[in-house]
Image (cartoon, grey):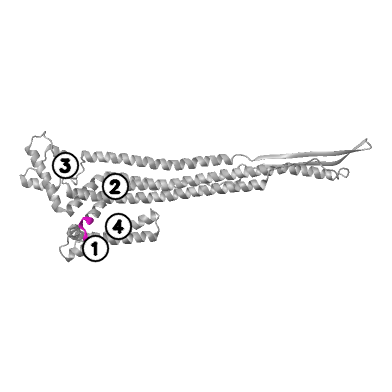
Amino acid sequence: MDVQAGPPNRGFLMSAKQHLALIMPFVWNAYSKPCPSDACEMLTLIFLCVLVSSTISTLLFVWMVFSLAYTHFVAGIVTCVSACVMLVLLILVHPVRCVVTVTVPSLGTKQGRKIILSTALLYAITSCVPNITNNMTRSLHMMKCSAGNITHSMLESSNVPKAALRDIGNKLASLPSIGSREYFFKLESDVDVKDMEKSLSQVSEHVKADLATLRSTVGQTSQIVKKIIAALFVVLMIGSSVVYVNGYLTHIKHDNVYQSHQLMEALQRMGGDVTLPRSYKKKLVKTSGVRMSAREVKRGLWGMLALLIYALMCGIMLGLDHFVYRSLQSLLAWASDIPDIRAAVHVQMTIKGTYIGLIHHEIQQLNRYYPYTVSMLPPGCVQSLSAPEHSVLTTVCTFLTIAFFMLHVEVFARRLRRKVCASFYRRREEQRTQYLLWKILEKRERPEGSDDS
């Protein structure tokens, strides 16, 4: 007996799809309704609100800790308070649920793209500027160290003539005939080497402290600016969602340019003719279609221009970091090739005497070299420069790529935003559809060349 069995997972997948098709409309209806109808919808609403608030709070915590450099304690307090407040508002206030839900597709619109582009630019600035400052600080330290070493070597070289004259004096003192005389060999110097070294050390410490203060100020300022801009863009994103929902509810013409299924069904019921006037064919777009209106095309071109400007600014910061590093690296290699200055004082002295004015003989002889070296850049002054991190370039390019992708899906994100509002406020969507239907029917009755009010 032969039994033919189908794929074991096929029936399970079909059953899962059927159950999901039945559950999802109920879940979305429970979430988008102003008030739950029964206990099941109430529990579903509470579960979804807990899920949404916990997800947003987790993302907020990760963003505050790893991007905005807040401490875990501060980020934990902020996220816990935000989660509790958000949960209460989501459960009790229907417009808040709509605003929060509209904010999700808003991430794919201009406001979300601004956050991505600003994050890319801030990441480039906060990564490149400290690296540039660090390389400049190290270069200045090497210059200071080299200048101090040259000054110290020049001051030390003044001891060479003293040593030579001291040796000459010792040779003369060893002669019995002149041992008790005062010598005319005397080298006076008004230079206090230790005092000058102390002054140079104090100046170098002041310069080092000023550079450290500058670097700390740049780092703190960049962090403060990053936090302010991040908070500003979050407020703007939520504010744009609030403005959109408010416009949807108060202005019947607000974003009412879509050829929805409700509109086509209403036209079918009115007379069976679903053909749109020529002007409305250009004005209305399908919510699931790929055709873009002239306004959407213009908005996309402006978005592309903004993307290019941000990419140019990020490229300038990254290029400046690489340029400073390469320039200082070349300067360091050139300075390392400068040879040390080597000099020497050669003293050659011979003292001769005569016996009875006739016999000459050599009494004392001094033949000595006193070398000294002035190092232009000693090894102790050389510090390795900090190369630009390749991860910064990779991260910035990733942000720009995401923004470029978001630019292409912005049209569909805006359409999805209208669909969300339509599901939350079904009666208002019916009024907007009736308004479009009335305008289309009025256009059919008027001449083709007349304008719409």
Quadrant where the image shows the N terminus: bottom left
The residue at which mark 3 appears reads as 284
Please tell me in which quadrant of the rendered image residue 149 appears.
top right
Give whichever of 313, 212 is nearer the camera. Answer: 212
Which stretch appears magenta? 91-97
Q: In terms of secondary structure, where does tag 2 sit?
A: helix
**In the image, farthest residue toward the right:** 356
Front tag of 4 and 3: 4
Q: In terms of secondary structure, where does tag 3 sit?
A: loop
Q: Position of residue 8 (x, y in %)?
A: 23, 61
Tell me which label, 4 or 3, sits earlier in the chain.
Answer: 4
Q: In terms of secondary structure, where does tag 1 sit?
A: helix
Give whichever of 3, 438 is nearer the camera. Answer: 438
The residue at which mark 1 appears reads as 47
Disc 1/disc 3 C-alpha distance (Å): 38 Å
Badge 2 local density, few (<14 within 10 Å), some, or many (20+)?
many
Please tell me in which quadrant of the rendered image residue 148 appears.
top right
